[in-house]
Image: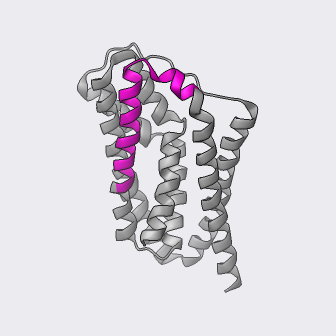
Amino acid sequence: MIEAFLAAWLGVALAQASPGPNMMAVTSVALGQGRKAALLLVAGIGTGTLVWAAAVSFGLGALFAAFPLLLTLLKFAGGFYLLLIAYRALRAIVAGETSTVTASKAPLSDLDAWRRGFFVVMTNPKAALMWSAVATFLFGAGLGSAQVLAFGPMVALSAVAIYGTYGLLFSTGMAMRTYGRFWRAIEAAFGLAFGALGATLLVWGIRDLRS
């Protein structure tokens, strides 16, 4: 279980560090409204992460128990999805692409900031696909629903740590230059980690078909 947790957590943590809707929401609020609003938004993201963990743990767990073949099919689907996002991350490096972060100027109350973070992660299609792929990886490694649920707090803590760091850095107004220097390394690590997870899922799917 520990090895599966660490492998999945590494991929998720690198995904959290990579550009996406969650990161853009945090950095834009940090730039426009400061540290407090950004950290409240991060708290909303962490809360939403726990909801995603519960949803995939019990929802997918029940489906896999009723339809064992579904796990094999999702291993292939999740594997190809992870390889796709790995390819996109590595392609961004070759193409020299980067993300533009703009400051959010609309005033936010404390509740509004938390709510924005919660709904950003809950309505993010990439979060849904990522959680489905990660849950498939963990179920495929032989873990049960309760164990997959226990993975949720790990992801929530890394989300708070990573996005909280972004919030603190970007609220100082000094991080744009630093991020511009290192985004390629972040994307490369993200792409390689998710590529390895995707390849592992495909290998497991092939083994299921042969058994």
Is 61 inside the magenta-drawn segment? Answer: no
Relative placement, left or right, of 134 versus 121 is: right
Q: Nearer the viewer, residue 145 or 67?
A: 145
Relative placement, left or right, of 94 versus 8 is: right
Above or below for 39 versus 195: above
* Horizontal and vertical percent position of residue 96: 71, 30
Furthest-right residue in view? 95
Above or below for 50 versus 205: above
Furthest-left residue in view? 110
* Horizontal and vertical percent position of residue 188: 64, 44
Q: Residue at x 63, y 48 (%)?
A: 191
- Is residue 180 something that shows in the picture? yes
* Horizontal and vertical percent position of residue 20: 53, 36
Q: Residue at x 58, y 26 (%)?
A: 180
Relative placement, left or right, of 78 versus 114 is: right
Q: How many marks?
A: 0
- Is residue 29 something that shows in the picture? no
Above or below for 188 versus 169: below
Prevailing secondary structure of the magenta residues: helix
Residues rendered magenta in the picture: 154-180
Is 176 inside the magenta-drawn segment? Answer: yes
* Horizontal and vertical percent position of residue 192: 64, 52
- Quadrant location of the C terminus? bottom right
Figure colour scheme: one colour
Q: Nearer the viewer, residue 57 or 147?
A: 147
- Quadrant location of the N terminus? bottom left
Q: Residue at x 50, y 73 (%)?
A: 64
**Splitting the image into 4 quarters, where does residue 183 fall?**
top right
Above or below for 20 versus 74: above
Q: Residue at x 68, y 58 (%)?
A: 80
